[in-house]
Every structure is written in structure tokens, then in C-alpha cells.
Image (cartoon, coloured by chain):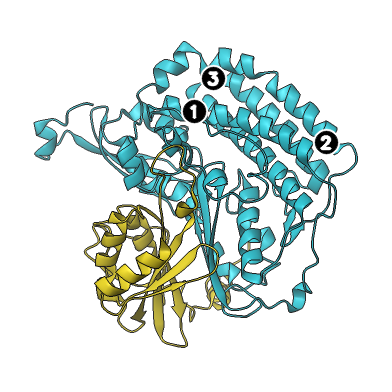
Chain colours: A yellow, B cyan
Amino acid sequence: MSNSLKGKLESTFKGVEMTLLKDTRAVVSAPKDSIVAILEYLKDKGFDHLALVSCVDWIEQNEFEIVYILTSYMRNNTDYSAEQWLHLFIKTRISRDNPELKSVTGIFENAEPYEREIHELFGVYFEGHPRLIPLFLERKYEIPPFRKDFDTRKYVKDTFDSIPSVED
Amino acid sequence: MPQITETARMGSTRELELYFGPQHLGMVGNFSITMKVEGDRILEATANPGYLHRGFEKLMEYRTWIQNFPMVCRMNVIEPDSMEMIYAMAVEKLAGLEVPERAHYVRSIFLELARVGSHLFGLWAYSNMLGFDTTAQWAMYHRDLVLDLFEELTGGRVYHIYLWPGGVRRDFPEGFKDKIVNTLHSIGGCVPDYDATFFNNRLFYDRAKGIGIVNPEQAKKFGATGQTLRATGMKYDIRKVEPYAAYDKVEWDVPTREKGDAYSRIWVIRDEMIESVHMIFKLLDAMPEGEVYNRVPNPFKWNIPKGEVYVRCESSRGELGLYMVSNGGDKPYRAHFRTPSYPHGLIVLEEALKGASIADVGNIMISLYVVAPEIDR
């Protein structure tokens, strides 16, 4: 299953590389422009459950890595076969200086809050997202707080040490 | 389904914006919903999390692998044990640690006890919100009996910090098996009472039937898992799909319902609780003797090799996942939790509330089993 998928993916899309890891994981690295097409293709192939959209800040390479984790729902109620174990990590790297990416909400609607979260916590802009409004945060931050160059401890000290304690 | 009238669509002044929570009697947890209503009908709902954002995932990047255990369990107040489990699983997979056979069984029993406790808490929340005070008090009392077991086993009632990469912290104390059996028998003996006062109660049936319907297509589209999905008829349970701990060692079944409404979801939760109790009995019988943990390297100097991992388990609310990256250091480089309440509380809830009555908002929200701290993290 995974070997034939590897061949098909790499021949259909340009610049795509699929690495099979041991146990049940496979990594698909792709350029950012083909992410939407790849996800659409994989959804047709039966990977219909987008479990998570995540972002990793690789500050030394000056890049963000957006990770889409795809698995499948069950075909029918008796099928607990190992095919469903396959986790696909679809990854793309984007520059930290201009973090922009196409939204995948058109294909997987449950990507909507994940992309909103990444927009808020990492400052990545998702083109075509229906509502990129704040999700968690109430304050404005100069650096989005989940980036590696945001120092939580310094921020806490600067912000909350200036508030007088109850005893004073 | 009520029709949205023409006047509402034209943007007439009959539309109101209404805030539901976080200070609202019908709201369980720090969470709020902004609703656009016309009369009693909800036209549009927006879920607002963020009242409880503690930035745990960022804080985890500042702490060593072992120091994170007391942190992760605080993400879900009601069922902290799945959080510990998922983190332990991720660390084990990254570091290549093995878990002894007996520890798998101890973990499964521990997690199933937590599931029973969590469902009883959920039953409290639901019946309390609908006004079934007697059932609510019973559920809270029975949950307390489960917490007593945890207290004896781990020393903590709510947060246990019992799991450890490579096993669990300590074996069952003497006579603990009998205590589990006795406690579960006394809870299970009350199932007919629960059925009579709550699950089969005509009042409850009328309040919950046909409310907050999520059909199978919607459930898949919005990434729903857990009871929300199983109430639409799919037997999707990570304990079966991708077995971990000792769940593949004993026979058990995944309870489902067909209708996808609040009533079906609560019945799935009820059946699941009973199935968990049976599973604990089977696990106790099948449990082998032996060690309960493997030695880990010195936690103060423990560097985990470079890599990334996505692990998942079935918490009492659905699929719980953890994506974790290590860059070869003594701390996680990045951790991202996929909590089940995240899709349920944000997009599934917004969809399920469309066309509902204001009186059913709390009803729908609790039946979707949303825990706000899980969303915010």
C-alpha cells in the first residue's frame, strides 16, 4: 500500500519526496504550492481524516515547517486492518521572513481552527482562510508567542512584575 | 429543522446578538458562545475559547522530559490520565523504550478507571444542567469512590502523575485488586437506578431526543471522533484501530448508536462506561506477574535522539493525539496536542447549534462532551 502510494505521489507531483519510516509512518515533503493538490489527491485515496495541522519553528534554518497529519476513518464497521494505522506527515517549509501559505479549509473543513491557531501563535498567514480572527490570545504581542525567539520567561517578568502585589 | 425566515435573512432588527458564558449557569467550564438569534432560534453561533489559555505547549519547551509529566496532566482537568499516557507513549517512541508486560495491564486498568471516573463526572454535569439533581449527586458520589482508588494507588486524587516512560511508578498495593472489584460492583449495582431516574426517564428523553444532530457526513467532515462519531454508527475507537497498552489482549466491544443526537451520545457514554467496567474485570484476571517499569537513563542528563512522532490514544472524549519533535536535546523542541474537544467544541458545536433553541445550548454543548481546558491548552 505505502510503496505504491510512494510511486504514484512522486510521479504525479513535482518536487515531492516520500520517505517511509519504520512502523506505520511516512513523511511526504512537498513544496508549498502543491500542498492543496496533494491533500486533495490523498483525500480521494482514502486518507479522509485530517488529525492535526501543526507548525514547527526551525529558527536556525530561518524556516517554518507546516505539518499536516493524515490518517483514515474506517471504511466499514468490521474493518480494523492495519491500513488505517498509516500516518502520513505532509510537510512543507516556508520562509520565516514571509510566512504565507494557501489555506486547506476548502478540502478539510476541520483545518479551520488549526490554521487560525497557527496564524495567531506563529504569525503564518493563510491565504483564502474564511476568518483569521484571534482564537486564544487577548493581548497584542510584538513577536507571535510560539516562535522560538519569543522568550516566555522574560515576557512574564516584564509584564507581570510591574503589577503591584496585593500586600503592597 | 426550523426555517430561517426571510426577515432574518434581510438583516432586520429582530436579530439579536447574545452572549452565552463564561459566567452563565448553563455553561460548564471557561468557555463562551456568541450567538445571533431571532426569537428563540439560533441563526449563527461562534465559539470563543481563550479564557484558559496557559500556553502549556510553549512551557513544555522549557522543561526536561521528566519535568513535563506534572504539566501535561493539567491540560484536561477531568481526565488527566490520558494526557499522561499520550506523553509517556510519545517519549517511549522517541527514545525507543520498552514497557514490561505487566505495566501494560496496569496502565490499561488505570486508564479505564479514569474513563469511568470521567464519564461519571460528565454524567454529573449533564444531569445537573438538566435539573436531575438526584442523579447528579449519585454520579458525583460514585466518582468520589473512584478517586479514593486513585488516592490509594498514587497519592493524588485528581492529578496522579503515575505513569513514567517505561512503565508506571509503582505496582498495585496489597489487596488493591479486591478494592477495585468491590468499588466497581457497588457502582455497577446502581445502573438500574441510573436508568430509571435518568437514561430511561421520559423527561430526559424529551429534552435530549433530536437535539444537536450530527450526521455521519458532518462528523467526518469536521474531524469528529469519540462519542460524537460513535453516536452516528461508526465503531471508530483508537483502542481498536491502533491498540496500545493491553487493549488488544482482552475481548471487548465498541458501543454505538445510530441517530447522532444528544440522546444517542449520552447512551453511548453510558454503554461505554459499562463496557469499561467489564474490561477492567477481564484485565484484572489476565494480568501477569512481573516488573512494572524498566529503568530509564538519569532524568537529569537524558537526551532523546532527534526525531518526530505522532501518537494517539482514546481519551474519554475521543481521539487524543500528540505530535512531538525532538532535536536531540534534553527538552521537547515542539509539542502539539490534538485534543478531542478541539474540533467538537469549535466547529462541530457551531454547526450543531444552528437552528437550535436557546434553551438547548447547554444541553448540546455538554452532550458533545466539550472540556474547555483541553481546547485552550
Respond whether the residues carrying marks 2 and 1 are from the same subunit.
yes
Residue B264 visible in the current orientation: yes
Structural crowding at the residue carrying mark 3, measured as other residues with C-alpha within 10 Å and reported as few (<14), some (14–19) or many (≥20): some
According to the picture, the residue beneath numbered tag 2 turns out to be: B177
Picture quarter with the N terminus of chain B: top left
Name the kind of residue labelled 2 in the image: Lys
Name the kind of residue labelled 3 in the image: Phe
Structural crowding at the residue carrying mark 2, measured as other residues with C-alpha within 10 Å and reported as few (<14), some (14–19) or many (≥20): few
Q: Residue at x 36, y 82 (%)?
A: A96
Secondary structure under tag 2 reads helix
Secondary structure under tag 1 reads helix
Chain under numbered label 1: B
* Residue B132: numbered disc: 3
Residue A110: x %, y % from top left:
34, 52
Of marks 2 and 3, which one's residue comes earlier in the chain?
A: 3
- Horizontal side of residue A46 vs B164, given as left or right: left
Of marks 3 and 1, which one's residue comes earlier in the chain?
A: 3
Residue B210 vertical placement versus B342 (above, below) = above
Residue A66: x %, y % from top left:
39, 71
According to the picture, the residue beneath numbered tag 1 turns out to be: B266
Name the kind of residue labelled 1 in the image: Ile
Residue B310 vertical placement versus A17 (above, below) = above
Chain under numbered label 3: B
